[in-house]
Amino acid sequence: MSHEHRRAWWQGSSAPAWVDLLRETPRGPDPGRPPGAARAEPAGELRAAVRGVVAAGLHGLCFSPYEPGQGPGIPVPERTVERRLQVIAPYTRWIRSFSCTEGHEATPRLARRAGMKTLVGAWLGKDREVNRREIDGAIALAREGMADMVAVGNEVLLRGDLEEPELLEAIDRVRRAVPHVPVGYVDAYFLFEKHPRVARACDVVMANCYPFWEGCPLEHAVAYMQDMYRRSCVAAEGRPVLIAETGWPDRGAAVGEARPSPEHAMRYFLEAQAWARRDGVEMFHFAAFDEAWKIDVEGDVGAYWGLWDQQGQFKYA
């Protein structure tokens, strides 16, 4: 379905019941609980609403196949990738992968076999030899017809792993190798403003939009995310823009006024999905599964962004 047709279809649909639920359910503090704290048990209506939205089908999910005890640097068996994809395949049209080495190259092939579209990511970092293998892998998958889009790098500028000229060279290499496939780059929304040459090098600008990591309280989070998207569109200068990642954790430490909890995670998910549906925005929810290895790089909150837990159980059943 094209972007224009999707927008017309979504805008022509009647508002789902959970939109009214969000309007009617109070956000303010409950008597007897600390200001800003989430309710001990999220409302059953919110859980049912999340189940309904997921069952109806999401535009896209960010997918890493790691099971407990696995993480970057450990090759992922194909059977693990297949097992994880089978869990989420009924609920999403697109999968976004993050690497083309260490077994992750199986993700686009298996996803396509399961009927999903693929945003194939090449992970770039400080190791130039690893970068070469990642780029070669992304090109090979695109030439096989396994990639509907390719992302050359993820938050490379944010981490400071590469300078702009080297990133531009990598993007250009992939674009020239697979001119039939849209190619872009993923980073925090504001870095496309700071690096206009990178935005211009992309067929598609792929923005990560996280109100949580900027300490935004839940009641303002979706409006803040919408402004992140708007700024990305300005930086894109007419090029297509998609939200490559957004989400909210359900456990862990707060960041400023942004507090993790199951209720907050559900509310953010529902409101973000309602906006994307209304405005025809292509958005990838982060993430499909919880990932324990992320504790080492993001603290305890890093492990709890999934709609499914590490064991593959849906968290809002």
Image (cartoon, rainbow, N blue to C red):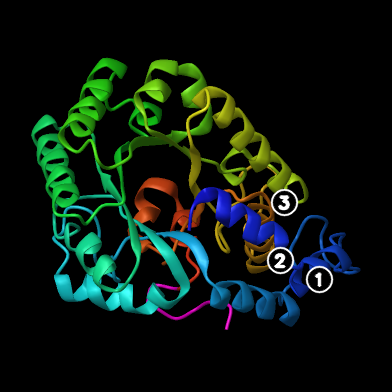
**Horizontal side of residue 10 vs 43, given as left or right:** left
Three-letter code, disc 1: Leu
Three-letter code, disc 3: Leu
Q: Is residue 273 visible?
A: no
Viewer-side residue, 296 vs 225:
225
Q: Are marks 1 and 2 in contact (CB under 8 Å)?
A: no
> Is disc 3 surrounded by few (<14), some (14 to 19) or many (20+) residues within 10 Å?
many
Task: State how many labels appear.
Answer: 3
> Is residue 254 located in the magenta-colored stretch of the structure?
no
The residue indicated by pointer 1 is: 21
Q: Is the C terminus in the top left, top right, bottom left or bottom right quadrant?
A: bottom right
The residue indicated by pointer 3 is: 218
Residue 248, compared with residue 85, is above or below; it is above
Question: Residue 121 at x, y = what percent?
Answer: 28, 46
The residue indicated by pointer 2 is: 13
Q: CA distance from mark 1 to mark 2?
A: 17 Å
Residue 248 lies in what quarter of the image? bottom right
Three-letter code, disc 2: Ser
Query: Helix or strand or loop: what does disc 3 sit on?
Result: helix
Residue 2, compared with residue 90, is above or below; it is above
Q: Which residues are magenta?
A: 309-317
Viewer-side residue, 16 vs 289:
16
Comparing labels 3 and 1, the label whose residue is closer to the camera: 1
Q: Residue furthest right?
A: 31
Residue 177 lies in what quarter of the image? top left
Q: Is residue 304 visible?
A: yes
**Horizontal side of residue 1 vs 27, given as left or right:** left
> Is residue 315 located in the magenta-colored stretch of the structure?
yes
